[in-house]
Amino acid sequence: MVASGLPAHRDDHAAAAAEMALDMQAAVESLRSKLELELTIRIGMDSGPVIAGVIGRHRFIYDLWGDTVDTASRMESHGLSGKIQVTEATFRRLGAGYRFEDRGEVPIKGKGAMRAYLLLGRAEGNAPSGAG
């Protein structure tokens, strides 16, 4: 799990997460080719508020909770192998800087039908921001 814009707010949090997801996808593809393995990655993204905190008495763990975390997890688990699936909230935040494929309404366990998009890459003229 990755969270962008925590603990310090950043206006480009969605773009930073998208850049990381695209870089992860490229790294896995590179490894797959070099090692000649059937290796893929499935990534899910959502944007919104989360609850964050430290839990534990003997072993401390920093964790995140909330609907945004649950929805991002569902985007991954209901996504396609080798793809980055994002919610409509993330699609709107990323805007014209990226290319998408509209998947339409996708049945999501515990959520019902949700509009989902596949993040395909940067839009032409949108250079990597180095935000990752």
Image: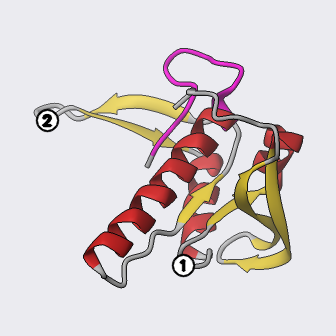
> Along the polypeptide, which appears first: circle 1 or circle 2?
2
Q: Magenta part of the protein: which range?
A: 2-14
Q: Position of residue 67 (x, y in %)?
A: 64, 50
Q: What residue did someone put label 1 on? A: 81
Relative to residue 67, is residue 57 depicted above or below? above
| Magenta portion: prevailing SS class | loop
Q: Residue at x 70, y 39 (%)?
A: 48
Residue 35, position as x, y percentages in the image: 26, 75
* Front-most of residues 103 and 30: 30
Residue drawn at 46 percent across, 43 percent down:
2
Q: Residues within 10 Å of mark 2 (few under 14, many from 20)?
A: few
Magenta stretch: includes residue 9: yes
Q: Label 1 vs label 2: CA separation? A: 35 Å
Residue positioned 37% across, 74% down in the render: 33
Figure coloring = secondary structure
Q: Is residue 105 left or right of residue 14?
A: right
User: Quadrant of residue 63 in the image?
Assistant: top left
The secondary structure type at the circle numbered 1 is loop
Q: Amino acid at mark 1?
A: Ser
Q: Nearer the viewer, residue 116 or 31?
A: 31
Q: Is residue 120 above or below residue 4?
A: below
Residue tagged 2? 59
Circle 2: residue type: Arg
